[in-house]
Image (tube, helix red, strand yellow):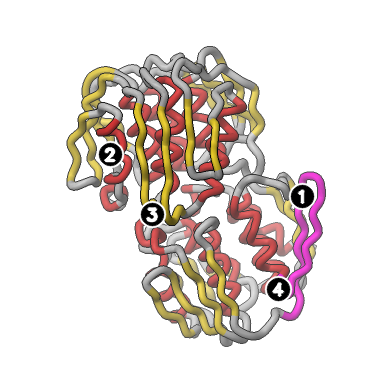
Amino acid sequence: MEIKPVRRLNATVEVPGSKSYTQRALVVACLAEGRSMLSNALISEDTRYLVEALRFLGAEIVISGSDVTVTGTGGNVHNPGRVIMLGNNGTALRFLTTVASLGKGEYILDGSSRLRERPLGPLLDALRILGVQFQSRDGYPPVKIVAEGLKGGNVAFADVESSQYISSLLIGAPYAAGDIQVALTGRTVSQPYIDMTVDVMGRFGAEVSTRERKIFNVSCGQHYRGQRYIIEGDVSSASYFFLAAALCHGRVRVVNINPASLQGDINILGIMESLGCSVVRGDHWVEVAGGALREGDFLFDMGNMPDMVPTLAVLASFRRGQTIITNVSHLRVKESDRIAALVSELKNIGVAAEETSDGLIVVGGKPHGAHIETYNDHRIAMSFAIAGLAVPGIRIQDRHCVGKSFPGFWDELSKLYED
């Protein structure tokens, strides 16, 4: 698919519900007592894999547009007696590893060849302490869980590479036989995602006590209760339209966005302001206007918003100066080796870039058109598609991979051409 440059950008677009909130709400609603009504859910490839898995585990789920009705299991996780396939949904893999541990018998979780490259080891080590037996391929899927429920206990993570391990344990902890404490030491990436998990758990009736965002205590005997829950818009998806405003020196308003969101990706707005964009925040919308991008050398620690690295890398390619992106080594085990993919495709469009041990360095220049390999990675496809709005000749080789998180991306992108 070739992206045509936009001549004048003055548009309003809408993004779907948050991918992260959708998946958390679905899993919690599956464990809850009674019925939950989830509004504005993201219905995407990842969502459908998760929904099918939750049905196997005993939840009744009905999808109508972007509304999802979930009749929960009350914590009584069923055993489907078959392999649960999760595609390349790494979040579902981590979350359901703990959920399956609440059941009885053997559960096997597996997925695509890429999912089999996504690590589970630290989570499995923690579950072992809590009484769970399992078999895995050196800490990678497929994983066989021999479940007899979770015992209480204390687990600790040092320099954890994925916040999903912590979120997984927290979500299942209310149904353990005893209290669970999760302690974090050293570096923790993607901390805002843990905050989102605690937020969703609280909305469904389970409290997590925290100390300095490093120690999390969950008392046993709590139960999630079915809720009406509205899922806020996805800031990750919105970021591509913020990027469009920045590259095209135009204005884009994204509706269905909470400027005070717990989603860590909202902090991309501060970075864009520091690089010369103007940002206006409304009650349920954000508007970005682009201008001359600030020159010079900048360093950005992206550990709390790793999904924003493709957005920032493409922005950096259009800016004179060096941009150093750090603390994102865990991007190597996303849908692709995202660091290597970004460096390769930035070079492909004529921009100097190099990998580092925990990120990449981009030296902005004058990008040109090229065939963009997406590596079956939705975020590579969407970020480089936006580059095509500013320079001619950008061609996205696999447009369909955006279905993992934003099936309507191309329709919303088309709105940028409307006068």
Residue at image mark 2: 124
Magenta segment: does it hold 284?
Answer: yes
Label 1: element kind: strand
Alpha carbons under labels 2 and 1: distance apart: 40 Å
Q: Which residues are magenta?
A: 274-292
Q: Nearer the viewer, mark 1 or mark 4?
A: 1
Left-right relation of 59 to 278? left
Whichever of callouts 3 and 4 sits on the residue coming sooner in the sequence is 3
Do the residues bearing badges 2 and 4 touch, measured as CB atoms within 8 Å? Answer: no
User: Disc 3 and disc 1: Cα gap in Å?
Assistant: 35 Å
Sequence-first tag of 3 and 2: 2
- For the residue pair 239 and 63, the one nearer the viewer reads as 239
Residue 61 x %, y %: 49, 22
The alpha-carbon separation of the residues under discs 2 and 4 comes to: 46 Å
Q: Nearer the viewer, residue 200 or 143?
A: 200
Q: What is the three-letter code of the residue carrying label 2?
A: Leu
